[in-house]
Image (cartoon, rainbow, N blue to C red):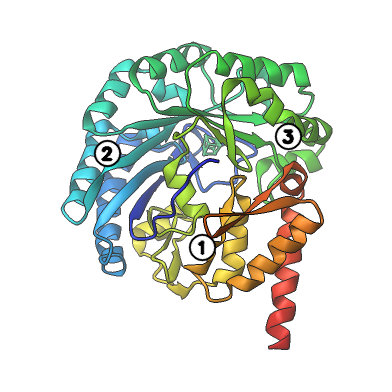
Amino acid sequence: MIEIKRKPNYLGIYIHFPFCLQKCHYCDFYSLGLNEHNLDIKEIEKIFIERILEEFLLRYPYFKEFNKINTIYFGGGTASFLSAQSIKKLLQYFKDFFLFTEDCEITLEGNPEHLYDKDYLLNLKEIGINRINVGYQTKQFNFLQKMNRYYNPDHYEKVLYNISSIFDNWGVDLIYGFPDQTLEDFKKDLDFILSFPLKHLSLYSLTVEHGTMYEKLIHQNFLKEPNQNLQEEIFLNLPSLLKNYAFIQYEISNFAKKNYECRHNLRYWLYEPYLGLGPSSHGFNGKYRYNNYRNWLKWLKNFHENYTIHEPLKEIAITMFRLCIPINLKWIENITKHHQIFLDFFMEMANKEFGTLTSLENQIFFQWNLEGISLLDNKILEFFEKIDQLTYIS
Ligand code: SF4
């Protein structure tokens, strides 16, 4: 059984750099396309780093009880726009306030247009980045082109060779279910990626998010909807497609080789604390949550100090239920005194054959099966209905 420990006494830091070369039609992250806004990246980077340091100082009092950091994640947008010097400056600053654990995972997420560059990768390694995640999505450029995603064939060709020659712990994001994509197309992407020694694979089905350009272009009949039949077929076949490569599905969209799970992303699903910095990021200190403005200019002007108390019953369902590894009831007991509600729900799910309940060394574990995972959104809603009824009765 895969062994994951919940570590609520350690803190993680997330930094959101909200700029990309151009905005992908399907993208729902807060990010601005430099090409569309005519912005100078060097100027932006300088302002961004200064502002992040200011935000860190403002948030610090809410997190100072944690004296150790075990994960840091530079995401976006396209965090690989940040120079190694800027990242180093942030890491050194954080070190003035917190200790880093010996195995502190420090991830940079980026795109092929920067991560193909060997000198950049070497500099990242030198300043302490020890994990790379690359937004590859697909090697079939016609799909990227239709979705307005920037690509340069030369970078796409080199990037995985170069990352694998420098980093041990690295992963790739792929998207599946593009309109007109076939299973064979997807398998070509997968086979190509799996010919490299990557340790982590995130597989996302293309979705139409509200307010995106993709949604608009579908309504105007310029683009087709995602290929849902293909998405279902791929989702159900993923475990067998990846079986021979020793990848374990530890979250609904995430697969990793043993001991190479993304420890930072696990902290969201394990209900651990994190300090989020940058526009649109959010934070949680174990009791209070906050959300930053999803707006670069507003974030530059002032920070959104809207701390609200967490709501563990619903939030555990939204986060921890996404795990495909066994969920330890002890984790929930340590967060809320209402853990019996979860045990009852897990028993019901096990009776209805959506998962299994096991007991090992005085601990109880629940694990979804493939059917449970494929119906996860509905199952979370069912759980919400149950707790709403309980709140009403009490
Ligand atoms: S590169 Fe990533 S973050 Fe940027 S617009 Fe595309 S999907 Fe969004």
Residue 309 at x, y percent in the picture: 47, 75
Number of on-image labels:
3
The disc at residue 330 is 1
Question: Viewer-proximal residue, 82 or 362?
Answer: 362
Q: Quadrant of residue 74?
A: top left
Residue drawn at point x = 75 percent, y = 79 percent: 389
Cα separation between marks 2 and 1:
37 Å
Residue 102 at x, y percent in the picture: 24, 42
In this rendering, the label closer to the viewer, 3 or 2: 3
**Secondary structure beneath disc 3?**
helix
Q: Taking the image as drawn, is residue 145 in sight? A: no
Disc 3 marks which residue? 235
Q: Is mark 2 within 8 Å of ligand 1?
A: no
Q: Taking the image as drawn, is residue 220 in sight? A: yes
Disc 2 marks which residue? 87
Residue drawn at point x = 33 percent, y = 35 percent: 82
Q: What's the residue type where badge 2 is placed?
A: Ile
Q: Residues within 10 Å of mark 3 (few under 14, many from 20)?
A: many
Q: Residues within 10 Å of mark 2 (few under 14, many from 20)?
A: many
Q: What's the residue type where badge 3 is placed?
A: Phe
Q: Residues within 10 Å of mark 1 (few under 14, many from 20)?
A: some
Residue drawn at point x = 38 percent, y = 43 percent: 73
Q: What's the residue type where badge 1 is placed?
A: Lys
Q: Residue furthest bottom?
A: 394
Which of pointers 3 and 2 lies earlier in the amino acid sequence? 2
**Secondary structure beneath disc 2?**
helix
Image quarter in which the C terminus is found: bottom right
